[in-house]
Image (spheres, rainbow, N blue to C red):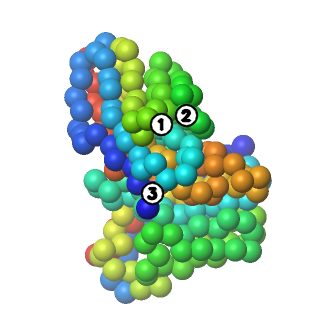
């Protein structure tokens, strides 16, 4: 079936540190891949997406590249800020109308 | 545009009580979804509605029913609440393209935090 495996959290970093959150997906079909972010007390917001192999999604300094050969979509940011503290979810499309989510990774950035 | 709205924001029920969670979207989206979020388990799909007039079970449908009232509104009903249904519930919507594309961004509401005692 379709599944997404995310790096276990929580992750705690100092401000301006480099961030990587690993994500791998099952290679069924030709999925689109997403990173969503959830700030405290809010719903999920789309952070970035990639719809085919070798695409790079980017937004707000975050990047992720769709790697078909390693079935990965790792999230990176070169210099995190306190305001990036949130829960990050990797997701893949399961069909034209459904998403399968990873378990989420809590990120805390300390000043 | 308000996007996706949900009511109520918080609710406490006793075991066996019933309630309906409301969701509405103003983006003219075809597809709507109900998820529950539990610690360490990400989001799990309860039910979805690919288009007005249709509903289908997701990963965890037991104990729930849904109604797609019209294109804008999709409600989730708990007929007899159980403590295992304590969770945060999210409604989402997407365009639900019929073109066969696998890209379908979902837009989420702010959530309903439900506690069943």
Residue at (49, 33) in percent of width and height:
A66
Q: Chain of mark 2?
A: A
Q: Disc 2, disc 1: CB below 8 Å?
A: yes
* Image quarter (top left, top right, bottom left or bottom right) of the N terminus of chain B: top right
B18 versus A75 height, above or below: below
Q: Provide the residue designation for mark 3.
A: A2
B88 versus A106 height, above or below: below
Residues packed near mark 2 inside 10 Å, few (<14), some (14 to 19) or many (20 plus): some
Q: Disc 3, disc 1: CB below 8 Å?
A: no
Q: Provide the residue designation for mark 1.
A: A68
Asked if residue A18 can be seen in this view, the reply is yes
Q: Position of residue B58 (x, y in %)?
A: 51, 69
Find numbered disc 2 in the image and state the secondary structure of the residue it sits on. loop
Q: Chain of mark 3?
A: A
Q: Provide the residue designation for mark 2.
A: A53
Nearest to the observer: residue B25 or residue A74: A74
Q: Position of residue B68 (x, y in %)?
A: 68, 72
Q: Are marks 3 and 1 on the same chain?
A: yes
Q: Position of residue B37 (x, y in %)?
A: 39, 58
Marks 2 and 3, how far apart in space?
Answer: 17 Å
Q: Of discs 3 and 1, which sits in the foreground?
A: 1
Residue at (28, 15) in percent of width and height:
A17
Q: Earlier in the sequence, mark 3 or mark 1?
A: 3
């Amino acid at each position: 079936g379709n599944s997404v495996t995310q790096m276990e959290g929580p992750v705690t970093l100092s401000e301006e540190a480099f961030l990587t959150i690993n994500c791998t997906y099952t290679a069924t079909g030709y999925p689109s891949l997403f990173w969503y972010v959830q700030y405290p007390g809010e719903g999920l917001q789309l952070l970035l997406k990639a719809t085919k192999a070798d695409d790079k999604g980017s937004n707000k300094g975050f990047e992720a590249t769709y790697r078909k050969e390693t079935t990965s979509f790792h999230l990176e940011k070169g210099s995190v800020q306190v305001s990036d503290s949130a829960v990050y979810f990797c997701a893949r499309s399961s069909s034209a109308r459904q998403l399968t989510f990873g378990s989420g990774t809590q990120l805390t950035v300390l000043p | 545009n308000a996007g996706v709205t949900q009511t109520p924001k918080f609710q406490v029920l006793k075991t066996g009580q019933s309630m309906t969670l409301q969701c509405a979207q103003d983006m003219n989206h075809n597809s709507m979804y109900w998820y529950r979020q539990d610690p360490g388990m990400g989001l799990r799909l309860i039910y979805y509605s690919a288009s007005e007039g249709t509903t289908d079970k997701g990963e965890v449908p037991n104990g729930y029913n849904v109604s797609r009232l019209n294109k804008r509104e999709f409600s989730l009903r708990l007929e007899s609440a159980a403590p295992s249904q304590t969770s945060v519930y999210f409604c989402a919507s997407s365009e639900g393209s019929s073109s066969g594309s696998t890209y379908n961004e979902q837009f989420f509401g702010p959530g309903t935090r439900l506690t069943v005692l």
